Structure formats: C-alpha cells, structure tokens
Image: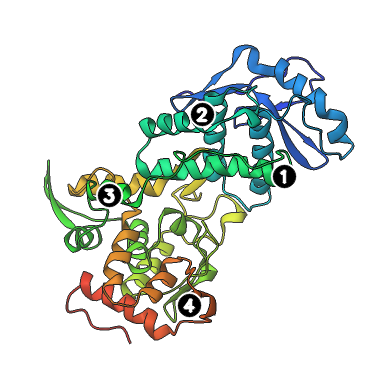
Amino acid sequence: MPKTSKPKKPYANFPLTPHASGTWQKKIRGKIHYFGAWARRVNGKFVHVEGDGWKDALEKYKAVADDLHSGRTPRVKPGGLTVKDLANAFLTAKLRKVEAGELSSNLFYDYKLITDLLVAAFGSNRLVDDLAAEDFSKLRSTMAKRWGPVRLGNSITRAKSVFKFGYDSALLERPVRYGPEFVKPDKSVLRRHRAGRPSKMFEREDLRAMLDGKMIPGADGEALVRADPTLRAMVLLGVNCGFGNTDCAELTLTAVDMEKGWINFPRPKTGIARRCPLWPETVTAIRDSIMVRRQPASPKDANRVFLTTRGTPFVVQKKPGYRYDLIKDKFGTLLSTLGIRRDGVNFYALRHTFETIGGDSKDQVAVNLMMGHVDSSMAGVYRERIDDTRLRAVADHVRAWLWPGALTVA
C-alpha cells in the first residue's frame, strides 16, 4: 500500500511542521503542541484534508502563540472549550509522555483514534459543556456497531480519560456527565463473547511440531519442518516464561543468566518486574540462536538477544499506529507450513498456553510473577518476594506437560 506523504509547507516561513500522526505541530519551549490536521484516517489510511488544513492550523497557532512562547497557559476561548480544542490539548500532553518514554507509540495512536472519533461524532466546534447524556448514548451505539465488546470497553475508558484530563487540567469547570448508558459492557457479555471464540492456546501436539519438527509432504517427498533456531528459542521463551512478541524482541543479553538458567527482565509494555527459571532446552535454544545471530546494524541494538538477518530488531514501532513485527510474520508462516494455523491464534497465544498450564500448578502467585502481571490485592502490597523454588515448580509443571516423562530440572 503506498505511503501517504506529508504535505510541504505552504510557504517558506510557515511556522508549523507536519507530524506523522496527521496533524500540524510546533515545538515551543521544549513542548510539542498541535494546531490542526493535515490528514484524516479513513479505513486505516491517511487521506489529505482539503488544502492540507494549513490555514485552519495557522489560525489556531496565532490565537495562542503569544501565550505559548511566553510560557503562559493559553486562555480558553470566550465561548468555551470545544471538543477539538480538548482533543488537541489531550494529545499534546500524551505526546510529551511518548517523547519522555512514559507512553508507547501504539497507545498514543489508540488515543488519537478516540479523539478523532469524538471530534467526528460531536463536531469540532461543539462546546464540551454542551454535551449531554444523549450524545454519549449515540456515541456508544456507534462504537458498539464498529467494535466487539472488549475493544468497546477499552474505547469507552479512553474516551472518558479525555474528558477527565480536561477537568483535571482546569480546562473544564466541572466533570462531564455521561449518563447511565455510556458504560463498559457487562462482564456477562464479555464471557459470552469469549465463549464463542476459538481457544487461544496451543496444545502439546502443536508445540511439539513447532519445536521437534513434523514431516510434511512436498514435491521432492517428505521433509522435516520445524522452527529455525531463532524462532525456536522464541517459541520456547513463550511457553517456558510466557513471553510475547515484544518481550522476545526487547530481551537483552544482560537479562539472561544462561549459566544458572534464569531471566530477570521487566515487561517492556508495563515495566513490571519478572523473573523466570529457564528449561535446559530453552538455554540451549538461546545459545543456538546467538550462534547464528547477525551483527547489529546499529550499536544501540548490540545488547539484544535476537536480531533479524539484517541485524535489526524483530519488532519496530515506525510511527504511531504502525508496528513492523517480523516475529508475527515468521510464526504465521511456520503455522501455515505445519498445517496448524487457526484464525486469531498467533505468537501471543503462547502466553495463553503458559498461563493456562502454569495455573494447573496451583501457584497463581508464582505464575503472575513469571508472566509480569501486577498483583493489586492487599497480599501483593505486603508480599516482598517469592521463593525461587515456587517459580521453578511452575516451570517444571509446564515442562512436564509439554514433554511427559522429562526429568525434573535440578
């Protein structure tokens, strides 16, 4: 699909620059500010707005330029705060968090989708104070037709966070009242939705085919097909430790103690601490992968355990909303070749497998630590550590399920 090019500045001294998110921006006193859109996302693709929206963006910039360049917070328009102004203020705050490394580009893009939806549903010049329960009821109906219950719930939460930001930032004098209908789907709805979906885990036979190989008929007779050394190590990390795509792509050499067989590696997504005992098979697979690992194309990637054949990371966030994920592609190809591919079941299903089988060990606290899940209970507040023998017991339980009769790791 051809990439939508950013617009050129309408004239040499135009004060704003186009941003990859489809907006005009300017960095003032070290902070990024938005002033209007040069493109809208239609069916997942950027489409230029009429005239690239530069006139409207310039008008917005001039209205607040003096305050921003002087370090003052711009006053709200006399008529009140509009939905579009609130959306721009919210995104500006979130973009600062992205630049500070406190928010992922993916999540920023999710917020951008929500603010675009709010502007489209309510109108860019609609006053926030004018919004009523009926408006949010119609918005929920629109969202429910577009998305399933899980995404609907997440989107409602994000939409509410936009208006909460407005009140917390003193842009609004009072909290927004959404009415009784603008709520997340009931838990029973989520349960029925999940019950109708295929199982998102791999059974023992499928995992053994990926790791040990499976004879597949071909033009020249049968051939043994299994994951290559790098992908095999990643699959083992998925079922041994509950690693996902980004976990594998971000894993560092310094986080892996292959002599003692342990990984200490916070989840890249949340920063939550995680500790996992490695099976002998996983250690061997990681060593095999490192043996064929290419030299890093950039010095900043020298500490990554896994690199592509080009010496680049397997998962790269190129811009908000677009993630290059070679693990997903390679794993999907492997499943197709083995004849075990199912819709909606991908590399992340290895986390589901570990959680499901690990839970049968009857030590959910240890499973949670290995998965990198936060324990928000009072016990989690008071618990200072978990003994390694408990973590080892969970790992041994999953290994014995995958390879029945395998000797327990000392």
Q: Which mark is residue 169?
A: 1
Which of 116 and 82 lies nearest the eye of the viewer? 82
User: How many numbered discs sit on the rendered protein?
Assistant: 4
Task: Measure the alpha-carbon separation of dots 3 and 4.
Answer: 29 Å
Which secondary structure lies at badge 2?
A: helix
Q: Which of the two discs, 1 and 4, labels the residue nearer the N terminus? A: 1
How many other residues sit within 10 Å of disc 2, few (<14), some (14-19) or many (≥20)? some
Give residue 183's position: percent from left, percent from top: 45, 43
| Residue 264 appears left or right of 334 | right
Which is in the foreground here, disc 3 or disc 2?
2
Marks 1/4 in contact by CB < 8 Å: the verdict is no
Per the image, the residue denoted by label 4 is 379
Which secondary structure lies at badge 1?
A: loop
Q: Amino acid at mark 4?
A: Ala
Which of 145 and 371 lies nearest the eye of the viewer? 145
Q: Which of the two discs, 2 and 4, labels the residue nearer the N terminus? A: 2
Q: Residue furthest right?
A: 70
Per the image, the residue denoted by label 2 is 135
Question: In which image quadrant can residue 90 be found?
Answer: top right
Q: Which of the two discs, 3 and 4, labels the residue nearer the N terminus? A: 3
Task: Measure the alpha-carbon separation of dots 3 and 1.
Answer: 38 Å
Quadrant in the picture for the C terminus: bottom left
Which secondary structure lies at badge 3?
A: helix
Task: Measure the alpha-carbon separation of dots 3 and 2.
Answer: 29 Å
Query: In the picture shown, does residue 256 fall above or below 177?
Result: below
Residue at 59 percent of width and 16 percent of height: 49
Which is in the foreground here, disc 2 or disc 4?
2
Query: In the picture shown, does residue 17 fall above or below 406?
Result: above
Marks 1/2 in contact by CB < 8 Å: the verdict is no
Marks 3/1 in contact by CB < 8 Å: the verdict is no
